Structures are given as structure tokens and as C-alpha cells.
Image (cartoon, grey):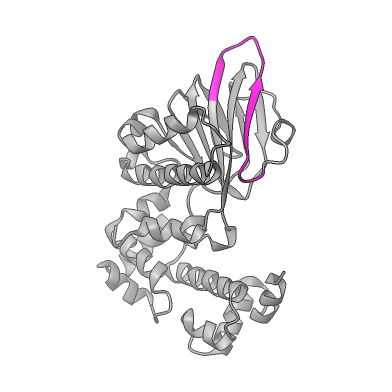
Amino acid sequence: MDGDLLSDLLAPLRLHGVFHSRWQARAPWGVAGQRENCALLHYVDQGSCTVELPGLPPVTLATGDLAVFPHGSAHRLADRPGRATVPLSGVLPERQPGGVRTVEIDGPGARTVMLCGGLHYDRAAATPLYQALPPLFVLESARLRAHPLLGATLERLAGEWDTAAPGAQLVALRAFELVFVLALRAALDAPGSALPAGAAVLEALRHPGVAAALHTVQTRFAEPWTVETLAAQAGMSRSAFAATFRRLVGQAPMRHLTARRMQEAARLLSETALPHNRISERVGYGTPVGFHLAFRQWYGLTPGEYRADARP
């Protein structure tokens, strides 16, 4: 990758807390969770289970497998596909960052032991590139073994520790953060055939030309880019670059650039007192009028209205 694009992808998220739980469930069992404002991790320490997402085929997790949900997508967990489920809110109510819980589900069947974690982040800070990640990717145990630090951290997290010890919450947050970063890195290292369904953006991150353009958009969005100059940055012809970028990222290059500029503009309006003309310069618009029109078209609000709504 050109530059550290993985850091560019994750650094703006500003992770601020983790809720994690240890599950011991015996078949038959099934739990359905709604979409959450966090990234989710499920690590199977013993046994197996099935993950089901709307519109996707069921995925079986075996012992040692890790499932990552970058957007906290709604999904079902059960001992087998099609199993009747109960709402997660009834099993684990009030899942606040910093909490640790144990869940036990009794039954006569096979036993599954899992570690589940929810990494809370500022969704507004998620870059367009992060938002393009697939709803789920799975790292099988063999891939975890190829990344010893990731595997060892998961094994340690799956064990018990003294949650009352000084700094325990911060240690847990940093450990889950490490797992999240290492899992994405392991996914990027996977052979093309091993990438999860819908993970074209992961392929984009390791495509030499497209990755160079993505790094440029992520870090130099205020410059006056065109499709031609981005293609030159990627070392590709205009037509090949535009087609490859759209296929892998899911957006045209200039649309992705606009999304990055608008995301940064929204952040500046929410978090700073900079005047609109200064913000327009920082995000690559030559005039405040052009910025005003682009922002209103993107968000359906003027910059002033957006700033007023973002105030406590």
C-alpha cells in the first residue's frame, strides 16, 4: 500500500470504549442482535456456531475462528442455521462501554464458548473508505495462526482476568483495538480467493494504483484533484483507473473525493468554531459559495444549519 493506508482507515475512528462478554451456550440456542453503533467481534474459543446476516448465506464459525463486523450490522447467532432466536437485548440488556458480562444458555446439546466484543467509535468520524468495508469478514483459525500476535491476544482475551484490577477497562479497550487492527491487516494479507464476499474494498487497499489514489484522497483531499491527476497519481490511464476504482471502491473517484471532503467539513463544523470560508479552503473548495452549495446538496442542510444541529 502507498503510505500506511490501514492507519488512515482506522485512526479517525477514535475508539472510546468496549463492552465484552463471554458466552457459554448449549444447543439449542439462537440470539438476534440489532444494528449497533460499534464494531463487533465474535471469537469462538470452543465448539461452533452459525452467523446469519440479511441477504447473505449463513456462515459457520468453528473453534478458533474470528468474525468481524466493522459496522455493527444486525445479525443472528445460533447453534445451526434457521434456529429460532430471542432478542439480544433480553439476554444482555444495557450493554455500556466498559462493561463485562457472562452469558450462560443451558441446553442438552453441544457446547459453544465465545468471546464477543463491541468497540464503540464516533460513527461520524468514519471515513468513506471505512464505510465501504463489507458488513462481515471471517478469519479462520489457520489464518489466525499465521498471525501469532493476533491469535495470542484473542486467546488471552478469551480467558478470565481480574476486571477489578487497576486500569482493567483501558487494558481491555487497547487489547480489543489491537485485535481489530490486526484482524484487518490479516484480511488484507489474505489471498484474493480468500477475501470475504463483498470485500472488494479490501482488494482496493492492496491494489498498487487504487491504493495510491485512496491514500491521496484520504490525506490530500484539499488539493484540486481531477480524474486525470488522480489517475496519474495511481500510474494508470484515465479510463483504466476510473473503471478499476469504481469496481473496487463502489464509487466513482470524484464521488469518493467529495465524500471525503464532506466528511471532513462535517467534522470541522461539529468540532471547531472555524468560519465557513476557512472550512471551505480546508476541504478544497475555492469559494464559500461553492462549498455551501456542495454541502447542502450532500447533507440536505446548509453548513450553518448543520453546525447548529451539532451543538449540544
Residue 281 image position (x, y, % from top left): 48, 85
Q: Nearer the viewer, residue 297 or 165?
A: 165
Above or below, 294 relative to 131: below
Above or below, 173 relative to 286: above
Q: Quadrant of residue 27?
A: top right
Furthest residue toward left: 235
Q: Is residue 102 magenta?
A: yes
* Residue drawn at the location 37% of the way across and 37% of the way down: 150
Q: Quadrant of residue 23?
A: top right
* Residue 95 placement, left or right of 286: right
* Residue drawn at the location 50% of the way across and 62% of the way down: 128
Above or below, 108 relative to 295: above
Residues in magenta, as a range: 96-113
Q: Quadrant of residue 249?
A: bottom left
Residue 121 image position (x, y, % from top left): 56, 54
Q: Is residue 277 magenta?
A: no
Quadrant showing the C terminus: bottom right
Furthest residue toward top: 108
Residue 114 image position (x, y, % from top left): 54, 27
- Residue 94 showing in the rendered view: yes
Quadrant showing the N terminus: bottom left
- Residue 120 showing in the rendered view: no
* Residue drawn at the location 34% of the way across and 33% of the way down: 143
Residue 156 image position (x, y, % from top left): 44, 31
* Residue 131 placement, left or right of 89: left
Q: Nearer the viewer, residue 291 or 312?
A: 312
